Image (spheres, coloured by chain):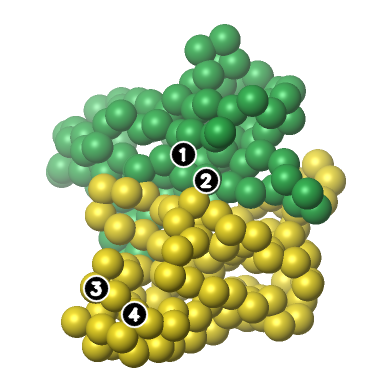
Amino acid sequence: NAGVTQTPKFQVLKTGQSMTLQCAQDMNHNSMYWYRQDPGMGLRLIYYSASEGTTDKGEVPNGYNVSRLNKREFSLRLESAAPSQTSVYFCASSEAKGGGLGANVLTFGAGSRLTVL
Amino acid sequence: AQKVTQAQTEISVVEKEDVTLDCVYETRDTTYYLFWYKQPPSGELVFLIRRNSFDEQNEISGRYSWNFQKSTSSFNFTITASQVVDSAVYFCALSGHYTGGFKTIFGAGTRLFVKA
């Protein structure tokens, strides 16, 4: 039971470099999310995807792009990394439909720690 | 706009003390969900509880209990007889509906230290 898998776990970039964080889930969830976690700020939503083929901006989308490649995969791209994007990034997924016990409950990946110098 | 406020940044207690973590939320949705998640020092995020907006019944699970009050827009979390293993960051979260699904936002978190 892999759940949500994120890669890489750690990455160091120089300002201006680009990179893609990969996320895959094997729970057949419809919705996927990218959050960033910074000290004192909690988890802030970057982008989310209600279902395959749809993406929407969250609270802090600037400087990021996403791709919902298929139902399983949701990638986050930094086109030109900045020091302000140094953070821990979490991917999550959920079954968004209905009122069942699992609806809306987020299952998180282990996180990706990104440092931009 | 939706918002979750956890006013307590850090709380420190001695083992066996009871502790309450506060959560206040704002939303204009009539249907919404409230959650608590735990992040232990290892860093993973663990779901604790979900409550929907139509169910104000309080819940108890072992040493954990939750008090949901729509009148004050609060969803507080109490740990009874705290243990060192309860040391973690606790996040309150609010999920509201958008086209096709739900979007979840989090409070800033409360870091709980339980000392032996």
Q: Secondary structure at mark 3?
A: helix
Which residue: 81% across, 42% down? A99
Taking the image as shown, residue A104 lies to the left or right of residue A58, namely right
- Please say if the residues under marks 4 and 3 sit with CB atoms less than 8 Å apart: no
Residue beneath disc 2: B105
Q: Is residue A82 above or below residue B18?
A: below
Of badges 3 and 1, nearer the viewer stands 3
Q: Which mark is residue A81?
A: 4
Residue beneath disc 1: B92
Indicate the colour of chain A: yellow
Say yes or no: labels 4 and 2 on the same chain. no
Indicate the colour of chain B: green
Taking the image as shown, residue A42 lies to the left or right of residue A40, namely right
Q: Amino acid at mark 4?
A: Ala
> Alpha-carbon distance for marks 2 and 3?
24 Å
For the N terminus of chain B, the quadrant is: top right
Dot 4 crowding, Cα within 10 Å, few <14, some 14–19, many 20+: many
Q: Is residue A20 above or below residue B20?
A: below
For the C terminus of chain B, the quadrant is: top left
Say yes or no: labels 3 and 1 on the same chain. no
Q: Amino acid at mark 1?
A: Cys
**Where residue A40 appears, x then y in whole percent?**
26, 48
